[in-house]
Amino acid sequence: MQKLQGFAVSPGVAIGEALVLDHEGFRIPRRFVDRDVVASEIARLERAIEAAGQEIVRHRDTVARELGPQCAAIFEAHLQMLHDRPLRNELEEMIRERHYTPEYAVSRTLRRYAKVFQSLDNTYLAQRASDVFDIERRLLRYLLGERREEVAYLTSPVLVLAHNLTPSETANLNREFVRGLVTEEGGPGSHTAILAGALEIPAIVGTGPFLTDVSGGDLVIIDGDRGQVILHPDEETIARYTHEQQQQRSHAVRLESLRDLPAQTADGVRIQLMGNIEFPHEVQHCLDRGSDGIGLYRTEFLYLGSSTEPDEETHYAAYSQVVQAIGNRPVVIRTLDLGADKVPSMPHPADERNPFLGLRSIRLSLRNLPLFRTQLRAVLRASALGDVRVMFPLISTLLELRQAKMLLADVMEDLDENGIPFNRNLDVGMMVEVPAAVMMMDQFAAEVDFVSIGTNDLIQYTLAVDRGNKDVAALYNASDPAVLKLIQRAVEASVRAGIPVNVCGQMSGSTTYTMLLLGLGLRQLSVTPSSIPEVKKVIRSVNIPHCEAVARHALTLEHARDVKNYLKGELKRLFPELAE
């Protein structure tokens, strides 16, 4: 049994068979072949070994010419291992006797060899494990082909273990069969982490390297509450987590009774509790949990899920599906919030050294007006169907906000001229995600109908922490006093201006922060659909004076650790079943 620690980004426990995606994207599930094709599968393995051998010879000869025979000896060693008779016999036996596919036999056997090397005390021999992995990948390339296997096409439940996944790969995961997700790389605020949460599957990122220790088909436990991955669990651990799964299901059933009750504090203050969604199908998740509307509709999936830029009809179809499904409740549509490096249909910027400080979000939209205009036309057309509101992300200057509003007005004129219906009075809002926006909140509040505090980016830009960087992810902390003071300042300015203010980052979906946010004056929260029941439970059990006292005390503390411990202590005292 082996335990790994990563960042918990989507709660829950998943127990199941591993599907391993290594650095090159090979997926090697444990699969079997029919008895009558064993001979042909062994022949396929032999052809792959022959082809891999020829490739190694070519590399050996090239290196010998360019760098000399000493360097070429590396490939000679690879050849010897590839043609090692005991290894060939073992591979053939796994296919002939156990009916494994050649891919699984290769991956399983060579990874076992590599682990033996890695366990040796001799440093030189331990490093030979990398040679074994090199041979494994070379053989898999010939067995599987060069293309990366699509994880969208699955036929049975799996837990996906990957070095990393792009946001588009995560968005396209098959929700019917993918029951959990772990990546070696990534931080808690990465887009991949956010998308994993939207899929409502237990997910952990940033564990560090471990894929060499696991094979497809191995039993794995993902503890999305504690950020732990357990490889090859023993019987006692399996029993404990199976019991925990049952308890979580029972807890979820108890919370279902809150579905039709309002998110109202014990002293009668009504809180608008809305859902954050990525995909139109998530509207049903929100309705099932009694959401007051959609507080944040991220539209990035339209760009990530396709290699071509989405046209106006594609936008409109997605928006109208959400608006019609939610009925007379509000839908806040956020315009594109991606960097050019993340949009498959756009060329990557030539000198984008730090995408988080570069051409992204509203900056990208204002630099690509046809793209922005297309999205705004679709948003406005959808506004004729219900209570649609539009929100601009990453606003940092008044000029950006005014340019975005001017283009919106221009698009309205176009629609007017063409007799296309829309709501001319739709509310226009902005995300508060950078300290500059907070410092100018009084001026911004005079020009928008509402604001929403995006804590994921606000934490990142306040603390200068790349939220996708594992090495500094520990510094990314919603409890930091500087973050709390910025939220307090943004809320106070909005209240002075008489406009609604919402919080829609991951912070708002954590019950650790619910009392704090209410105490800071928030009366709207937008959270992931799965968080709605627990956040509603806290809201319905507390009163505003107590929440204000919690906020006042939290604001006196100097360190993020002290704030978090205090808030967790308060939560545990009142709701021991919700405390982590």
Image (tube, rainbow, N blue to C red):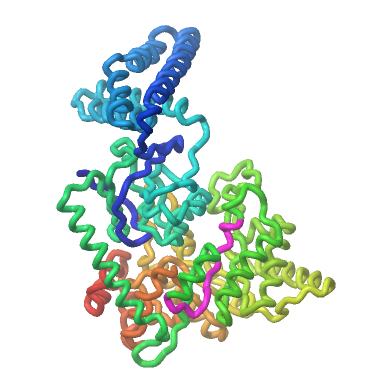
Residue in view at x 35 percent, y 28 percent = 106
Which residue is situated farthest in the front direction here? 36
Image position, residue 71 (x, y; %) = 40, 12
Q: Is residue 423 left or right of residue 535?
A: right
Residue at the image position 43 percent from the left and 25 percent from the top: 138
Q: Residue at x 70, y 79 (%)?
A: 423
| Residue 78 painted magenta | no
Query: How many numbered circles are shown?
Result: 0
Residue 213: image x %, image y %? Answer: 28, 37
Q: Which residues are magenta?
A: 289-302
Residue occupying the point 26% across, 30% down: 112
Give percent across and percent down for residue 215: 32, 38
Q: Is residue 526 above or below residue 88?
A: below
Q: Is residue 104 visible?
A: yes
Quadrant where the C terminus lies? bottom left
Instruction: Give above or below for 519 relative to 22.
Output: below
Q: Position of residue 288 (x, y in %)?
A: 44, 75
Q: Is residue 464 visible?
A: no
Q: Is residue 163 above or below residue 126?
A: below
In front here: 563 or 315? 315
Image quadrant holding the N terminus, namely: top left
Residue sitting at the far right: 417
The reply, left or right, for residue 162 in relation to residue 579 is: right
Q: For this view, does 357 lie left or right of residue 28?
A: right
Say left or right for 246 vs 273: left
The residue sitting at the left extreme is: 236
